[in-house]
Image (cartoon, grey):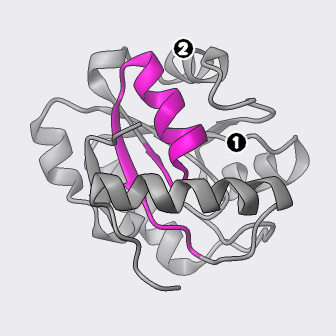
């Protein structure tokens, strides 16, 4: 359940340090990691960050539990691949993302905002995992329920969340 790294947001991660560790592929969660939950607007800040990551040599793939259209629309606007309907923390979508990226477990990092889906699934596969805080508190009902348990676990792990 413990991530390898914690950062308040995608924009606070030291990606050059990850690159120096041999990381070449990034698996990115969508909702509340890249964009606010349920929204399909891609900010200019996110677009610029993705361009920067490409310039640093990272391959990227979005892995989302959401289905189809919105995920594909956002990934298309960002110019990166995506896999939807992932059923995280099950690992098959992560393995599919590895094939898309052409990378392996040892050279891939996962970035996500949820311990019980993103980080757990990433750790099960063996990725280097980075936990970020959710962008907004607005979320799917089951996610809101899991967040209560997540708060307890985060406190025990010393991963105190910034206020949104």
**Towards the viewer: 11 or 153:** 153
State the image coordinates of residue 130 (x, y, percent, origin top left).
35, 47
Q: Is residue 41 above or below residue 14?
A: below
Please tell me the numbered disc located at residue 64: 1
At x 78%, y 71%, the residue is: 39
Q: Is residue 67 above or below residue 142?
A: above
Which residue appears at 84% of the width and 61% of the height? Answer: 141
Badge count = 2
Residue 102 visible, this angle: no
Q: Earlier in the sequence, mark 1 or mark 2?
A: 1
Question: Seen from this angle, which residue lies furthest bottom?
Answer: 164
Residue 33 at x, y percent in the picture: 55, 60
Quadrant in the picture for the N terminus: top left
> 100 or 65: which is nearer to us?
65
Tell me the quarter of the picture where residue 80 sits: top right
- Residue at (23, 53) in percent of width and height: 15
Judge from the rendering whether residue 161 lies leftward or rightward of residue 65; answer left or right: left
The stretch in magenta equals 111-135
Residue at mark 1 to residue at mark 2: CA–CA distance:
16 Å
Q: Nearer the viewer, residue 75 or 115?
A: 115
71 on left or right of 1: right
Residue at image mark 2: 99
Question: Residue 48, how many percent across, how many down?
Answer: 44, 70
Give the secondary structure at mark 1: loop
């Amino acid at each position: 359940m413990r991530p390898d790294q914690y950062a308040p947001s995608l924009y606070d991660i030291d990606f050059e340090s990850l690159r120096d560790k041999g990381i070449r592929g990034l698996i990115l969660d969508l909702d509340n990691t890249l964009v606010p939950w349920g929204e399909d607007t891609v900010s200019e800040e996110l677009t610029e960050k993705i361009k920067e990551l490409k310039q640093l040599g990272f391959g990227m793939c979005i892995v989302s539990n959401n289905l189809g259209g919105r995920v594909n629309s956002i990934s298309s606007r960002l110019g990166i691949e995506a896999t939807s309907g992932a059923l995280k923390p099950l690992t098959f979508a992560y393995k599919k993302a590895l094939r898309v990226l052409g990378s392996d477990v040892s050279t891939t990092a996962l970035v996500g905002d949820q311990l019980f889906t993103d980080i757990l699934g990433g750790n099960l596969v063996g990725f280097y995992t980075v936990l970020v805080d959710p962008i907004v508190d607005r979320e799917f009902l089951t996610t809101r329920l899991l967040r209560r348990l997540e708060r307890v676990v985060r406190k025990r792990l010393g991963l105190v969340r910034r206020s949104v």
